[in-house]
Amino acid sequence: MMKTFNINSHVILVLCIMSLGVWCYGEADYNDAVPMEEGEKTALYSAIQGFVGSWWNGSDLYPDPCGWTPVQGVSCDLFDGLWYVTALSIGPILDNYLDCAPIVEFRPQLFELKHLKSLTFFSCFVSPHEHPIIIPSKNWEKLAGNLETLEFRSNPGLIGKVPSSFGSLIRLQSLVLLENGLTGELPRNVGNLTKLKRLVLAANWFYGRIPDNFGGLNDLLILDLSRNVLSGSLPLTLGGLTSLLKLDLSNNQLVGSLPTVMCYMKNLTLLDLRNNRFSGGLTKSLQEMYSLEEMALSSNPIGGDLQGLEWHSLQNLVVLDLSNTGLTGEIPESIAELKRLRFLGLRGNRLTGNLSPKLATLPCVSALYLDGNNLTGELNFSGWFYAKMGRRFGAWNNPNLCYPVGLVSTGHAPYGVKPCQQEVSLVEATTNSKSGDGNFNQNSHLVASSGFPSYVIDGFWRFYLVQVFMIVQLLNCFL
């Protein structure tokens, strides 16, 4: 019985493998035999020709862009037994890409690709002076049923305003308009795209205020409006972006105080507000953004000091850049409790006081820039720390800061920092001078300790003794 069972098991196994092979072979034959919907094919070819030129006819594709020899940048899927385009990427992204012609056009057939989920243009419209082009204002609503990703990247020849019809793309999850020549105010109707997870409108020529209805994009994970000409203060509604992970508003002309509502962004890992005109000091709400890994506020006239924040609350902080922000006061020791910190930038402020040696104990720090302040006293860091950091430890341009000569070798001295001068003490060789009463050495030591050079001290006492001698001689004349 056992032998019979084994034979039957092998037979069943062989039959299963044969069935699986037939099923796979049949599926392959089926996919090869499935045609692309004819109207879809015609619309796709015409749309591509509008960008790459009429010379392209897809003749080298078998049997069509969704067959065995697909063109890079075109993806398809089956609907009702026919192939339809679901993704179209124009520009030099992949090998065998669809490269744009010098003169391009958005043909209406582009908007007939009714199953399109992703549309991307990369480095396609490159001539803003000879062949500029604008985004068409009509027909975008035809793609509203499926389009989830719309991107225009690195297209300096793409000019004009963002069409208001973008507001009809209600299924959009990613809108990226990066490094183009677009202008005008930020379109308010983008705030209606409530499914957005990524909104990148960086490196264009957008101006004006940030629309307050952007704060209603509750699912947004990334908001990047950097490198524009945006102005005005931050809308308080931004506090509603509680899912946000990255906020980049750097390199604009934004003004006003940092809003306290930022404390509601509990999930934020990147806060980049560099190169704006923010003022009013560091709001305490920053210390409640526990997830922050990068805080870059440099080159803003923020003012105030560092003492008001409980820095130890930001234990995830890796980058802290507060350079050129007009900060005053001392550097709190609590910054040394940021154990994950790799970059600390405090250069170009008006910070004072001594530096805590605890800063050198930061286990992960690889760049520490404190130059261009009014720090004073001795640098009590180890020679090993200076050797490890090199010029990534910046303490130059602090006129009253020095390092002790005896504790640090010349080869490992902090760059641009002067050595501390040794204390000068005068010793009087003759103890029974007529003018002395036993207090000379003590007084001279105090004066020398005040920082005057020895030759000044020596000259002072020579002058004093001469005056005493002359007075004694005058008294003798009258006696």
Image (cartoon, rainbow, N blue to C red):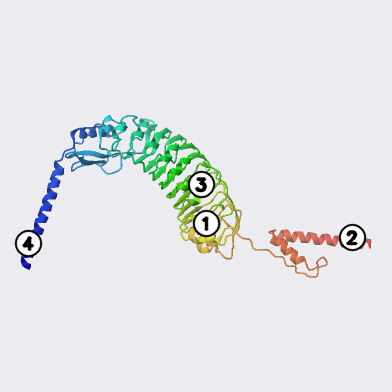
- The answer to whether residue 474 is left or right of residue 326 is right
- The answer to whether residue 156 is left or right of residue 331 is left
Q: To which residue does mark 3 refer?
A: 298
In the rendering, at what x and y percent does residue 144 appear? 30, 35
From the viewer's perspective, is the residue at label 3 or at label 2 nearer? 3
Q: For the point 51% across and 55% down, which residue is it?
A: 311
From the viewer's perspective, is the residue at label 2 or at label 1 nearer? 1
Rendered-image quadrant of the C terminus: bottom right
Q: CA distance from mark 2 to mark 1?
A: 67 Å
Q: To which residue does mark 1 refer?
A: 335
Q: Residues within 10 Å of mark 3 (few under 14, many from 20)?
A: many
- Tell which circle, 3 or 1, labels the residue nearer the N-terminal end: 3
Secondary structure under badge 3?
loop
Q: CA distance from mark 2 to mark 4?
A: 138 Å
Q: Residues within 10 Å of mark 4 (few under 14, many from 20)?
A: few
Front residue of this view, candidates 201 and 80: 80
- Tell which circle, 4 or 3, labels the residue nearer the N-terminal end: 4
Secondary structure under badge 4?
helix
* Amino acid residing under circle 2: Leu
Residues at marks 4 and 3 touching, judged by CB atoms closer than 8 Å: no
Rendered-image quadrant of the N terminus: bottom left
Q: To which residue does mark 4 refer?
A: 8
Front residue of this view, candidates 361 and 451: 361
Tell me, yes or no, if residue 93 can be seen here.
Answer: yes
Q: Residues within 10 Å of mark 1 (few under 14, many from 20)?
A: many
Residue 474: quadrant of the picture: bottom right
Residues at marks 1 and 4 touching, judged by CB atoms closer than 8 Å: no
Q: To which residue does mark 2 refer?
A: 474
* Amino acid residing under circle 1: Ile
From the viewer's perspective, is the residue at label 4 or at label 3 nearer? 4
